[in-house]
Amino acid sequence: MKIACLAGDGIGPEIMAEARRVLAALDLPGLTVWEGDVGGAGYRRHGHPLPPETLEMAKAADAVLFGAVGDPECDALPRHLRPEQAILGLRQALGLFANLRPATLFPGLETMSALRPEIAREIDLLIVRELNGDVYFGEKAIRTLPDGRRQGFDLMSYAEDEVRRIAHVAFKAARGRTRRLTSVDKANVLETSQLWRDVVIEVAAEYPDVALSHMYVDNAAMQLVRDPGQFDVIVTGNLFGDILSDQASMCVGSIGLLASAALGETQTAFGTKGLYEPIHGSAPDIAGQGKANPLAMILSLAMLLRHSLGREDDAGRVEAAVAATLGDGVRGADLGGSASTHEIGEAVLERL
């Protein structure tokens, strides 16, 4: 088993260190762990946010554990050299098109949610976000119109095969839960969304045991705060999924609790090759201060164990240790507590 650990920028190295301690405590047989530079760290040391040696390492690994990228000192660089291009480049190079973002309220955190406790405790959903299409990868530019005005544009597009493959992932995920799938789009305005809806309906014929519903993205954003318990699995495009998953993080109490998996179609000897990362950013304002919550990073490790290494028991142990840590009141500043990054990691290790 080979894992590439890419800590990145800001709080990335701090939270990665705690996940690495948990990984070491599991003492997995035959495990090799590699380290590589990405993001601003990759640019400063190698002249590119995704150095060739890091990319080759990621390709050779069974899974990638990713911290965070983003560095204000790199904001003035050309777009292709900015830290965020590292994660986009990895997703494309590794063929990672399906982003799984679970959102579940841990017992005891009801009062930390932005929602009323009786509503928040009903949250147990999975957002399946398409990763390789949409405006993130379409043609984009700033141009000058004939009258001298500047105009920015970004092309939103999906081919039907791109929609079909993410729909299959979502329907299969729904089969493993309560067999309810909500497809989120903006088909009343966007032709891209109309194609999305048409293809999802076609795929639904192959999953008669899954109840499919459709919802416009603006309504979905409202329903997430009005009645999040109505959702089981949500499938949506790249842009809408990015927004809704961050919104879901505040519903469960903190963005520091949400893990994610980016999966493709490549199978390894142990499972599906993937990249795993917390959905929060690099938080440069608190980097190096020991204030970062490492739990989303540790929960991302649990997803790696489950999906890429086929170690369901170990994944469950890690998730149970995180739940016990929170249940015992060990919390960082993001959850109203005072525990440091290292102290939270230590608490998880004790319960593991």
Image (cartoon, grey):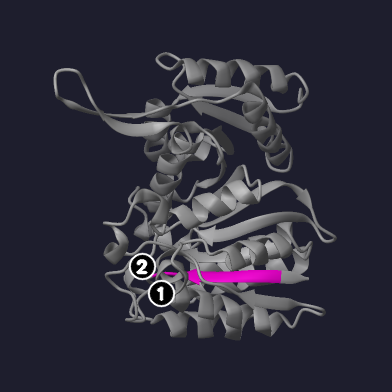
Q: In percent of the image, x 60 and y 54: which residue is there?
A: 261
Tell which residue pokes out farthest to the right in this image.
269
Q: What range is drawn magenta here? A: 3-9
Residue 118 visible from this viewpoint: no
Q: In percent of the image, x 62 and y 42: which residue is there?
A: 97
- Predominant SS along the magenta part: strand
Q: Looking at the rendering, which quadrant does residue 203 occupy?
A: top right
Q: Position of residue 299 (x, y in %)?
A: 57, 65
The residue indicated by pointer 1 is: 331
Kindly identify the amino acid type of the residue bearing the numbered disc 2. Answer: Leu
Element at label 2: helix
Q: Is residue 334 above or below residue 189?
A: below
Q: Looking at the rendering, which quadrant does residue 4 occupy?
A: bottom right
**Image quadrant containing the C terminus:** bottom right
Question: With 94 as the anchor, is 69 left or right in this view?
Answer: left
**Image quadrant containing the N terminus:** bottom right
Kindly identify the amino acid type of the residue bearing the numbered disc 1. Answer: Arg
Q: In percent of the image, x 43 and y 66: which residue is there?
A: 47
The disc label shown at residue 247, or none: none
In this rendered view, identify the residue nearer to me: 62 or 256: 62
In this rendered view, identify the residue nearer to me: 181 or 245: 245
Element at label 1: loop
Other-residue count near label 2 (Cα within 10 Å), few / some / many at <14 / 14–19 / ≥20? many
Q: CA distance from mark 2 to mark 1?
A: 6 Å
Please say if the residues under marks 2 and 1 sit with CB atoms less than 8 Å apart: yes
Q: Position of residue 295 (x, y in %)?
A: 50, 69
Q: Position of residue 50 (x, y in %)?
A: 51, 61
Other-residue count near label 1 (Cα within 10 Å), few / some / many at <14 / 14–19 / ≥20? many
Question: With 285 as the anchor, is 128 left or right in this view?
Answer: right
The residue indicated by pointer 2 is: 335
Q: In percent of the image, x 52 and y 35: which residue is there?
A: 230
